[in-house]
């Protein structure tokens, strides 16, 4: 066990943030690792408030977790970003040096890959992505490591379609964009990654095929989503937002504290307990 010599701080930032399970996961990690001097909080913060918040941080701050809408807004405010974060133009982790240096990283991409591999998913012949944006680009980066064939992205509007095709070219993934109105066709893919907000895929629940493959729905509240519940009822393999959250948080804890390995089972249990206490 390692004991922190003095108080260190970390937090998750975003809007909305009250639902975040990150405090439960990180605090469980600190307890299991023997880091009593560490604290982890949450702050409701939009893009406008981000520069002032960062400028006000003292030397006790070790790192930040970022959720929407800050994953791209933070990039101009950093001193450097890692290769994965640069590739997807999304930062979900900021490592703060004692001199105030700010480095952005992306643990969503390796978190997605690790969560799938934990379930035995190492290769798929093709895949579908529901939605666009920062999480969708991270999904494409993960699929670059897992998918042998084409990825179809179901999005709303031509601008989103062009954006996803562009991400595919940049990340080395063959991407075909399709209209959201045809999203039910996505459910026939061996792997479906849903990156949309709560409620967006509810109408697709009735279209789940008789023998579905693997669904990775990145939401964890509400859980299960209507799509996830229908998928599971038909015998499909299911991963949820908690799977992603745990695996990306493991990497955050290790980067912020410098202690590895992070206690994944304790973190997962803390997340499950927190969700259970909300009545989910």
Image: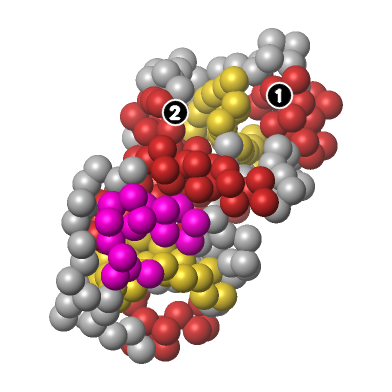
What secondary structure prevails in the magenta region?
helix
The answer to whether residue 91 is visible is no
Say if the magenta span includes residue 108. Answer: no
Q: Residues within 10 Å of mark 1 (few under 14, many from 20)?
A: many
Q: Residue at x 56, y 59 (%)?
A: 20
Say if the magenta span includes residue 28. Answer: yes
Counting residues from the start of the chain, the first of labels 1 and 2 encountered is 2
Residue 258 vs residue 187, the one in the foreground? 258
Disc 1 from disc 2: Cα separation = 17 Å
Q: Residue at x 42, y 43 (%)?
A: 266
Q: Quadrant of the C terminus?
A: top right
Secondary-structure class at tag 2: helix
Percent of width and height locating residue 9:
33, 73
Percent of width and height locating residue 209:
74, 16
Task: Give the quadrant of residue 61.
Answer: bottom left
Residue 32 vs residue 227, the one in the foreground? 32
Q: Which residue is mark 2?
A: 116
- Image position of 280 with respect to 127: above or below: below
Colouring method of the image: secondary structure
Percent of width and height locating residue 203:
82, 37
Q: Are marks 1 and 2 in contact (CB under 8 Å)?
A: no
103 left or right of 55 in image: left
Mark seen at residue 231:
1
Percent of width and height locating residue 101:
20, 75
Instruction: Please give the range of residues in magenta.
Output: 23-39
The answer to whether residue 29 is visible is yes
């Amino acid at each position: 066990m390692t004991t922190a010599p003095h108080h260190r701080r970390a937090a998750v930032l975003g809007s909305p943030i009250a639902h975040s399970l990150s405090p439960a996961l990180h605090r469980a990690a600190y307890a299991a690792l023997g880091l009593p001097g560490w604290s982890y909080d949450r702050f409701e913060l939009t893009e406008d408030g981000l520069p002032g918040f960062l400028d006000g941080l003292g030397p006790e701050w070790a790192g930040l977790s970022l959720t929407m809408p800050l994953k791209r807004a933070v990039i101009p405010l950093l001193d450097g970003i890692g290769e994965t974060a640069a590739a997807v133009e999304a930062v979900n982790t900021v490592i703060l040096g004692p001199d105030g240096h700010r480095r952005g990283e992306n643990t969503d991409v390796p978190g997605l890959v690790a969560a799938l591999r934990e379930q035995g998913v190492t290769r798929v012949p093709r895949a579908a992505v529901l939605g666009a944006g920062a999480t969708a680009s991270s999904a494409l980066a993960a699929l670059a490591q897992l998918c042998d064939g084409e990825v179809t992205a179901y999005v709303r509007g031509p601008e989103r379609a062009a954006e996803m095709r562009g991400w595919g070219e940049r990340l080395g993934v063959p991407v075909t964009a399709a209209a959201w109105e045809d999203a039910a066709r996505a459910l026939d893919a061996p792997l479906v990654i849903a990156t949309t907000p709560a409620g967006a895929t509810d109408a697709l629940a009735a279209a789940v095929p008789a023998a579905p493959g693997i669904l990775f729905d990145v939401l964890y509240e509400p859980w299960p989503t209507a799509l996830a519940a229908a998928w599971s009822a038909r015998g499909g393999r299911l991963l949820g937002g908690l799977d992603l959250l745990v695996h990306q948080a493991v990497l955050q804890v290790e980067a912020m504290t410098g202690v590895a390995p992070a206690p994944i089972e304790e973190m997962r249990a803390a997340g499950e307990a927190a969700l259970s206490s909300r009545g989910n």
